[in-house]
Image (spheres, rainbow, N blue to C red):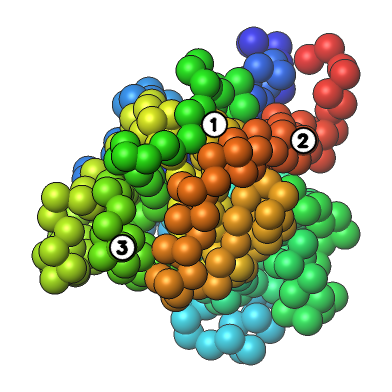
Amino acid sequence: MSNSPTLGYLIPQFPGQTHIFFWREILALERMGINVALFSTRPPPPGLISHVWSDEAMKRTEYLGNMDPRRAAKATLGVSPALWAKDVLREGRVLAKDLAIASAAAQKLKESCAARGIQHVHAHSCARSALVALLAQQLGGPTYSLTLHGPLSDYGPGQRLKWRHAKFATVITEKLRKELPELLGEDQPEKIFVQPMGVDVNALIRDVPYHPHQSPQQLRIFACGRLNIVKGHQDLMAAIRLLRDKGIDVRLDIAGEDDDGGSGYRKELENRITELDLQDHVALLGAISAEEVRRYLLSAHVFTLASWHEPLGVAYMEAMSCEVPTIGTNAGGVPELIRDGIDGLLVEPKSPDALANAIMLLARNPKDAQRLGQAGRTRIIERFNCEKGAELIAREALDLRVSEEI
């Protein structure tokens, strides 16, 4: 692909435990004949490196995060204060600090893109990585674009500055898109697309039929999400206790790790398992590979994630693609993915009772479980295929059409 266009692809702390959806998009771009040059701020903590492709990804990734005083000085001299002055005056020293931290990485990104002929960088972040892409552009480097993966307030200062100079942006849900005018005003880029990150429906497919739960066999439940209080794992454990108290033989496996590589919120969940006397019925699997996630999905009767708020939920998509009947929470952008009673079930967050009832409903109604599983896969194929995001980036970042010979 030496004569093919090259796209810069910037992801913070790549490859982390939740980054499988980035890798899928990268592979989709490469199937289209596009060279993808990977950049990241720094590697993730060792305990969060879990995928079989992680070593390959790290070898391919240029890390920009090491502070280089020479590059920082060069970047500071190369960017006019007029670029950021009004934003710093409005937002204060926090933004000024972020700009200073990002400056050396921006100079390094600009130099690397120039050497490799990269004319555009897509930043899969609206946090500090977006500042790196912005400053690199202002230093004479490539144009850039952004993806918003969650509430804008989660991504730090300087949002108007980051968005004002972007060639285009993608947002993963309609809900997030509707919030932007009030938050960004005139600083929105001309082109903003609603495009969720998707899954590879050809990889996440069953090679054995789904068999609904039949009593008296054990009811197998799978959940996948980082170990954080907002993911609601503690609520799911409480629901498992309620099911056990009703005499239901149930097993819950939770894939994912906390952001400290196992020394953070995991400890609280371990204590909660003991308090609920669920040591023989709930397992924390840690950060596992995509292949292991698929294996657990194919053996599960039900998938659920009890998030308090969730921008959208790639883990839901993976389960639905594998035809596993899926229970989500009516929070954030999840209702844009799961339509209650049509291709999954929705319950209110922070409600172990409602979650237990929904699980029991699927366990006791095998035909409904099978119907929802099949409808879930159809939903993912039609709306949440990773090829769609790759096609959009190719079109808008590189001015290519999918039908073109690349």
Residue in front for this viewpoint, 287 or 390: 287
Query: Which amino acid lies under the numbered mark 3 shown in the image of this protein?
Result: Lys
Q: Quadrant of the C terminus?
A: top right
Q: Which residue is mark 3?
A: 246
User: Do the residues bearing badges 2 and 1 touch, measured as CB atoms within 8 Å?
Assistant: no
The tag earlier along the polypeptide, 2 or 1, is: 1
Tell me how far mark 3 sits from mark 2, CA to CA.
38 Å
- Tell me the distance, in whole angstroms, between the alpha carbons under discs 2 and 1: 14 Å
**In the rendered image of this protein, does residue 93 appear above or below residue 244?**
below
Q: Is residue 111 visible?
A: no
For this rendering, which residue is in front, 57 or 5? Answer: 57
Pointers 1 and 3 in contact (C-beta within 8 Å): no
Residue identifier under label 1: 322
Q: Position of residue 349 (x, y in %)?
A: 50, 72
Mark 3 or mark 2, earlier in chain: 3
Provide the residue designation for mark 2: 382
